[in-house]
Image (spheres, rainbow, N blue to C red):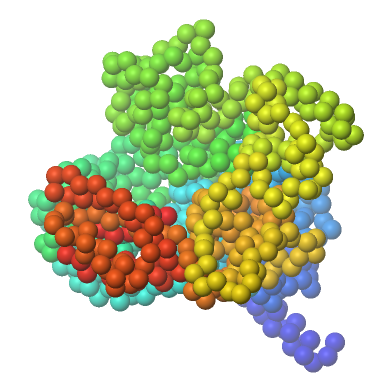
Amino acid sequence: MDEEDRKQVIDDDLLINGAFQKLIVSYLSSRHRKKVDLITKAFNFARQAHKGVRRLSGEPYIMHPIAVAQIACSEIGLGSTSICSALLHDVVEDTDYTVEDIENIFGPKIAQIVDGLTKISGGIFGEQASAQAENFKKLLLTMSDDIRVILIKIADRLHNMRTLESQPANKQYKIAGETLYIYAPLAHRLGLNKIKSELENLSFRFEHPEEFENIKSKLISSEDKRHELFDEFIVPIEVELQKMGLHYTIKERVKTPYSIWNKMQNKHVTFEEIYDILAVRIIFTPRSREEEVNECFNIYVAITKIYKSHPDRLRDWLNHPKANGYQALHVTLMSNQGHWIEVQIRSDRMDEVAEQGFAAHWKYKEGDDEDEYTEDEAELNEWLRTIKEILDDPQPDAMDFLDAIKLNLFASEIFVFTPKGEIKTMPAGCTALDFAFSIHTFLGSHCIGAKVNHKLVPLSHKLKSGDQIEILTSKSQHVQPAWINFVSTAKAKGKILAMLRRDNREVQKQGEELLTAWLTKNGKEFSLATVTQLAEYHDCKRREEFLVALAEKRVLLGEKDLDELDGKNNKKQPAGGKWRKYVPFVKSKQPDDDTGGELFIVPEKFNRKKPIYISESNIHQYKFPTCCHPIPGDDALGYINAKNLIEIHKRDCPVAAKLKSGFGNRILDAKWDMHKQMLFIATIRISGIDRVGLLNEITQVLSAQMNVNIRNLNITCEDGLFEGSFELRVHDRDDVHLIITNLKVIKDLKEISEIV
């Protein structure tokens, strides 16, 4: 070993030992019993197992398990079993040790958790499935026995996101997309608010770096103004709280860059138009646990005497906590400067639960396993039961499975009542049929209608907080395919799909027999790949859908299908032809020769780590689906589809979100290399106060001043107000920003945004 290597070993040892000592200090200062020996044993075992291995960032690999254990300990509040599992979580996957080895050395509980955290090989959903969804399913299977599996997985994901810098761009989009689609909603559902916010912000930063920096700099530049507003707002509140003799702190809470950007996208507003960036949090120490709810209301009464409250914005999470354990009283007050400010009132216990989630109020059993949680968290267990039901009857398609789980993770909650007056928490937007399935599968499948507040309503009736529901059933009623269109809960969707699949199996079998006979007649063999290829060709999302269409004679097989199987249709328009119907670009400066060419087919040894550059000369080689209409300047990515063709999507496209979560290995980094030689379609929405000559002023700005080609124009006026949309041809995203900026100068034009 030369001098340089020796120095590296010493530096590594200092780094590793320092990180481990920090972990031990955090553990010793926690409320858990002191199993330092067991943690040290797990650390030494993992250190030896990962010896000589480095991460992409260059640091020793063992630094990752230590960091995950540190998050589990200090940010989630878990004990020695979880810390040991976190230290060992990559040993089985990355080294020669097995789960049995872990069990022999550390016992069955740690081995079970490590096994749940280890990626799996082989398929549950069949050959077309996404490996990511497979891993997630295994995670949930283990999680339904021990919630710590998912908590450690979230800690693992948080550290991976914090160190995502060292990954290539396509890997960054895959991991960030998966984080937003699965892990942030999970953290939210488990009450890990701080971690949820950090996961969202990190995902946003890697997927949309320019927009992230832009919002961050605007938050910094408006900081002094916010502090001034906050200081002035809380002065009279502090006087009242002191009169009440309370021990309290008042915190300034600022919206995160991700939630600001999200609101800008959803509401089509600018940063300056968001008025709830600042919120105030009052955290107090109650005189006793029994009194804390009453004291929250006392504070509410005191502060609403100082400032006028918004009548529709009182949120009582005290008497009916959210499903993730969150408790607080939210009230929105009008400040002296004319701004609405939300005030959150909570006790210090409620605050701890809000930040750390269920881990903050788990009660730990006496005995050998110091952080075995007791099953008295009714809401969490109810949610785990729902997951178990979905796992008992899994979707055959990987992404459908992910969607079913994700459905209720981020849903707001409402409170409804049974006929006997029992309260039930349901996701906002749910229907009477969702409620029926939440009570019992039999009730849901035989439901013919409902009485809401003693009035007869259809199955599709949306429920509101405070509704009392009675479900009406009939033995002759059966599950209908149309039901899937108006239920919104994971349980109802899962059960309806399972029953429809059972009904469809006989019809599918007939379709399969027809297809097998046709293939045999034409000298071909039946295989899942063949069915998938023909299903795609006929624009069917699933193989099952295609087989049913065959049996019902809605699809007839012929020569074109044989051409498809022989690969002769690859460069032609598919049967559905969706992507060909939408051509998102036209050339504005025609070059001497048309270099459009045919669609690019990805070869076997294609380097997926390198970005693809979209230019005038090759843009025709890529598919542009109709889901998100990317134009030059948008943050974009490429996706290699089942036919090895590259689709271009916006990075924040809902379809791309699912692709990143389910098929991350097919994601490519896409960059624009355009030179304003092509025109793309963009649609601008406008609204304002109607007056004579307004439309003329708008068209003057667009046509005469900016020389923009208006393809389509649609305006409606009512009661002195107007709204409308313009379909324009633009070169890139900069053109859109310039158009919006120039239109803002026009008097009486109140709202301008792009329709995405």
470 lies left or right of 95 = left
Residue 388 position, x and y percent, is: 60, 33
* Residue closest to the eye, 226 or 455: 455
Residue 301 position, x and y percent, is: 14, 46
554 lies left or right of 716 = right
* Residue closest to the eye, 618 or 149: 618
Picture residue at 66% right of the left edge, 75% below the top: 57
Picture residue at 47% right of the left edge, 8% below the top: 474
Residue 447 position, x and y percent, is: 46, 15
How many numbered badges does the structure rendering display?
0
Picture residue at 61% right of the left edge, 45% below the top: 577
Residue 40 position, x and y percent, is: 69, 63
Regarding residue 662, the answer to whether it shows in the image is yes
Regarding residue 352, the answer to whether it shows in the image is no
Quadrant into which the N terminus falls: bottom right
Picture residue at 30% right of the left edge, 41% below the top: 318
- Most extreme residue toward the right is 523
Question: Measured along the vertical axis of the image, is residue 689 above or below residue 496?
Answer: below
* Residue closest to the eye, 285 or 684: 684
Residue 137 image-quadrant placement = top right
- Most extreme residue toward the bottom is 3
173 lies left or right of 531 = left
* Residue closest to the eye, 747 or 419: 747
Quadrant into which the C terminus falls: bottom left
Question: Measured along the vertical axis of the image, is residue 123 above or below residue 240?
Answer: above
193 lies left or right of 85 = left
- Most extreme residue toward the front is 592
